[in-house]
Image (cartoon, rainbow, N blue to C red):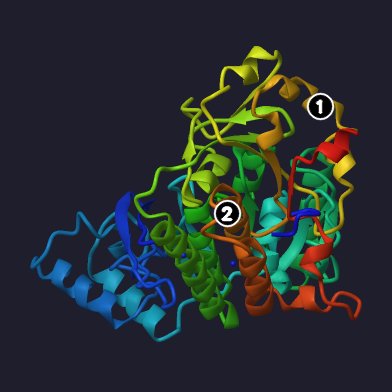
Amino acid sequence: MNTKQIAVVGVVAVLIVAAVAVVIMNLDDGGKNADIEASLAIGGNVDNDYRIDSKDMEILDKILNDEISSEEYPLADVDGNGTIDQADKTYLQKILDDEMDSVFVTDSYGNVQEISYPLDNIITVNADMAMLVSNLGAVDRVAGYIASDYPVEQTLLRNSDAIDISSGRQVKEAEYKAIRDIESDLDKKGEKIGAIFYYSSSALGYKADFEAAGIPILNVYCTSPESNADAYATYGYLFGGEYVQKGIDMCQYCYNVYDHIKNKVGDREKVTALGLNMNFYVCNNESQYADIIRFAGGVHVFTQPGDGSEKVTTPEGITDYDGMIDYMFNFSTQDLVNVDPLDLWKNNSKIKVLEASAQFEDMVWINCSMPVVVRVAYVAEIMYPDLFEGYGDQVFQEFIDEFLPYLNDLDGQKLNINEIMTACPYREEYYS
């Protein structure tokens, strides 16, 4: 572990995609590829694995011949019209022959949308969407983006031909106008906006207007460990070409890491932790940050339901956890740059309310400019240092070398993960 600022345990993970519970059965040996059964949420992926192939046609034939029930195979509705019939077989054959011009995808809200294939000219809303397409390398598929400015993390996107619509997280009046201008310019070239990727309903103003204009809207919840891995596979597939296999490979890598962590932690007593974000908000139990703690082998102690967070306004809001936790993890996006620890700790007035905690010195900042799987690796290293010494750095460098080569060529220089903020634990000298 980089001490200045701060590399997988038989997982059986249950994914709910398109209303099907899909069990991911992985190998015990973290050194081999896991046998991923992660859902690719595309109509035609009948067997709910991570690719569309002849096996899907075999199952569809059995459904059509009344040999098996369709109840466990919702993606057998290839054309998304609510019924499974011969038309679905015809559509699936077009997919297998690579002759389709659209597919049906189920987004994170369970909405089924017909999407042009391969997907092009997308609009991404917020930094999480920018990270997803950048990690996949699919910036050539982006027409425009709205994202808080993280120049190094987003260097691939910001050096592309995509239009920087605004720095922020929401579609407001100015952003809406800019997107419609992009739509108009594409129309002159005989093209169209392929889809708008967004993270939460609060981010997408003018949603009804976009839908009325025939622009597909896709909710992409890609920040929790499971959903992030699956998003690589699903949206890599939608982008087509080289991105199909890359998405599968990235998905596979993530689950291998999660397997390794689970196997290593095994049956030992689990570390307890509290997730924080936005400096002084306690994360609810279904939040992406609570999931990171769990996938890192820990127990998230705050059981309030929901995927949001609760603001800490009084000392009691944090002292209630005294004696209950081993660590607090404060998740914060800082870009892939060096960050002065004093700006996180001593000079940060927002965390003063947290100082009342008996576990304040057990708080660690985690940089959310790192890919989700990397965040999990660092959290696992911090919670179980005897099991995962150096693991955060290892996973981060592997992910860069295998999937993010542009970070090894930043203005001719390789990103040095020892010189940027990854994880930053408490140090007494920060307050001296």
Q: Circle 1 is placed at which residue position? A: 350
Q: Is residue 382 left or right of residue 173?
A: left
Q: Which mark is residue 84?
A: none
* Residue 229 in sight here: yes
**In-front residue for pair 323/133:** 323
**In-front residue for pair 396/175:** 396
Q: Which one is earlier in the sequence, the residue at label 1 or at label 2?
A: 1
Evaluate if marks 1 and 2 touch, with contact meaning CB atoms under 8 Å apart: no
Does residue 388 lie above or below 238 as drawn? above
Q: Indicate which label's residue lies in the foreground, 1 or 2.
A: 2
Q: How many marks?
A: 2
* Residue 137 in sight here: no
Figure quadrant of residue 150 = bottom right
Residue 147 lies, in percent from the top left, at 78, 51
Image quarter where the C terminus lies is top right
As drawn, the residue found furthest toward the bottom would be 97
Determine the secondary structure under disc 2.
Answer: loop
Which amino acid, mark 1? Lys
Residue at 71% x, 16% y is 313
Does residue 287 lie above or below 417 as drawn? above
Q: Circle 2 is placed at which residue position? A: 385
Residue 73 lies, in percent from the top left, at 25, 60
Residue at 83% x, 36% y is 345
Which amino acid, mark 2? Pro
**In-front residue for pair 272/117:** 272
